[in-house]
Image (cartoon, grey):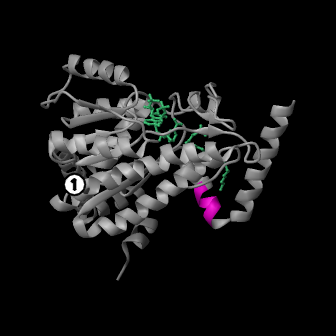
Amino acid sequence: PVSPSYLLKNLPKARAMDFITSTAILPLLFGCLGVFGLFRLLQWVRGKAYLRNAVVVITGATSGLGKECAKVFYAAGAKLVLCGRNSGALEELIRELTASHATKVQTYKPYLVTFDLTDPGAIVAAAAEILQCFGYVDILVNNAGISYRGTIMDTTVDVDKRVMETNYFGPVALTKALLPSMIKRRQGHIVAISSIQGKISIPFRSAYAASKHATQAFFDCLRAEMEQYEIEVTVISPGYIHTNLSVNAITADGSRYGVMDTTTAQGRSPVEVAHDVLAAVGKKKKDVILADLLPSLAIYLRTLAPGLFFSLMASRARKERKSKNS
Ligand SMILES: NC(=O)C1=CN([C@@H]2O[C@H](COP(=O)(O)OP(=O)(O)OC[C@H]3O[C@@H](n4cnc5c(N)ncnc54)[C@H](OP(=O)(O)O)[C@@H]3O)[C@@H](O)[C@H]2O)C=CC1
Ligand SMILES: CCCCCCCCCCCCCCCC(=O)OCC(=O)COP(=O)(O)O
């Protein structure tokens, strides 16, 4: 028997088109496209339904990615609990959200909870307040975080601890405080906003990269342990986003860095990233990288050719040191 590929190669173009249209190839192609389209549509509809009326807790909602996440989850019809340290900024955001009417679904006035993620007592109290108010939480978005700049040798252990408390122990404590009620309902979704630096470590970010690697590891373990209760875990690792992360970063002695780095300024818009977060949550994705090609390739390089990756990082450290000294 003559194979379709042989015929396609050997028949003139016109005859080849005749062949395609007169055989099952075209209907098969359209069939596959149709099934794929239907699957995507179903996924989209399910995602929308999943977020509508869901009780969603977002930490770090006062600025940057958290603020934009608040906007897209609000517009999707979620019942929001917005967390942060600055109650004035949260109240302002709630005013902004409730003033806009550009959504077709029913929206709910967000609830506000203020606490510091470095204060374990305040985290437990905040979780209790949220549960008392809503009875349950559907989705927790652990977004709040701080970054850091400094050399390991100059950095005090207090600074390492502060970054770990904000980016790792805080989200872990909040997750643990909300998990029992999720387990009881056999329903819930924990989201961790990590970073590309949760997958690869770059020089002069030791505390930050360590906190994000710890985040990735903890929430990967959690995903496996929670499968039995049907609780979802999504870890999201973005590349640079144009927010105030670098401005708010702390330095080796704990002072504020206060500089908008070029990498941050040239990062993706937080609005776009928030939409990607919403889509990932709606699709119950397990692990998502939201970055350009180079950082994504760097993750593969770290796994497949670690020696080369380490040399590149050492050269990056040399260059950065040189430019600082000159
Ligand atoms: N921007 C980027 O390039 C990238 C960011 N990310 C991650 O995205 C997340 C959001 O950061 P982004 O929006 O960029 O930065 P921002 O600095 O704009 O926002 C950080 C948020 O975290 C809150 N926060 C910081 N420390 C604490 C604390 N101790 N207790 C409670 N809340 C706190 C801040 O609240 P407050 O107003 O009280 O300071 C603020 O709302 C972080 O986890 C970050 O690591 C990941 C990859 C890239
Ligand atoms: C097969 C070819 C592979 C080539 C790989 C070359 C290696 C290039 C290194 C790229 C490093 C990318 C670092 C990305 C870091 C990042 O996106 O971090 C996100 C953040 O969390 C930003 O926080 P920060 O405080 O550091 O601004």
Q: Position of residue 229 (x, y in %)?
A: 23, 66
Q: Name the residue under label 1.
A: 34
| Residue count near mark 1 (Cα–Cα under 10 Å), binned few <14, some 14–19, many ≥20 | few
Please indicate, yes or no, whether residue 12 appears anywhere in the rendered image: no
Where residue 133 sits, quadrant-wise, is: top left
236 or 297, which lies in front?
Answer: 236
Q: Position of residue 139 (x, y in %)?
A: 26, 47
**Relative to 85, does residue 152 appear above or below in the rendering?**
below
> In the orientation shown, which residue stands out farthest toward the left?
106
The chief SS type of the magenta part is helix
8 or 79, which lies in front?
Answer: 79
The residue segment tinted magenta is 299-303
**Relative to 244, does residue 318 appear above or below in the rendering?**
below
Q: Going by the image, does 253 lie left or right of 26?
A: right
> In the orientation shown, which residue stands out farthest toward the bottom?
1
> In the orientation shown, which residue stands out farthest toward the right?
326
Ligand 2 location (quadrant): top right
